[in-house]
Amino acid sequence: VHSDVLSKEEIQTVLMDLESKEPWFYPLFLLWLSTGLRNGEIRGLTWDCVKWDEGELLVCKSLRRDGFKTGQHSWAPTKTGRERVVPLSGQVLKALQKHQQHMKDLDLAHPKALVFVTPSSHGVVYDQLLGRVWKRSLKRCGLQPRRLYSQRHSFLSHALAMGNSPADLAAAAGHSTKLLLDTYAKPTGRLR
């Protein structure tokens, strides 16, 4: 897990690579690396959960896969069963606005529509697809392979290192403070 945390420079390199080589997936990975959402929460994000004026994301549901081979998905509550609010940076809001316009052009951006869909069928994004995109980008950037879940580890570890309150961060991540510190407080190289 320690090696799952990308450095600040690695994150920037991967995001630049995705923006130029995989623009369909860039907003998804930017949001993921900027919020640390869980996989199912990214899959289940709908446009009505983006609170543009407040600069926040309402995390209230997830889209779970029903079995590995079936390709079926079902709606579920968040892992803890509680809603939470996650702040969004200006960069993320701008990328989401651009992405929303692209989805509107494809007639895929009504309020209850999924924010992120597959590029060809416009179906639910799935971990295997996202994992392939992630691995391709890491390889192009000359970085060691990391799990797809490293987005969450990287965000939470860096957010802690930047001095965010562990209690506030735990609330945004949907964890107890103890679990957040035990699981996600990994070295980031940001010690001052």
Image (cartoon, rainbow, N blue to C red):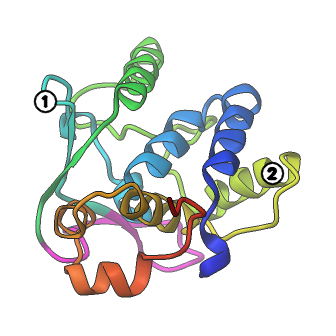
Residue 167 picture location, percent across and down: 17, 69
Q: Is residue 6 magenta-colored?
A: no
Q: Residues within 10 Å of mark 2 (few under 14, many from 20)?
A: some
Horizontal side of residue 20 vs 76, given as left or right: right
- Is residue 65 something one can see in this rendering? yes
- In the image, what residue type sits under mark 1? Glu
| Residue at 51 percent of width and 34 percent of height | 27
Q: Main secondary structure of the magenta part?
A: loop
Q: Quadrant of the N terminus?
A: bottom right
Residue 104 lies in quadrant:
top left
Q: Amino acid at mark 2?
A: Arg
Where does the image place residue 50, in percent across and percent down from the top left? 23, 35
Magenta stretch: includes residue 65: yes
Instruction: Name the foreground residue: 78 vs 67.
Output: 78
Q: Is label 1 in a helix, a strand or a loop?
A: loop
Tag 2's secondary structure?
helix
Lower sequence index among marks 2 and 1:
1
* First to last magenta residue range: 63-81
Q: Residue at label 1?
A: 54
> Who is closer to the viewer here, 17 or 112?
17
Label 2 sits on residue: 136
Q: Position of residue 181 (x, y in %)?
A: 34, 81
Work out whether 43 lies above or below 20. below
Check the image and name the residue furthest to the front. 192
Q: Who's the residue at 64% across and 40% down the image?
A: 12
Q: Is residue 159 left or right of residue 5?
A: left
41 to 56, vertically: above or below: below
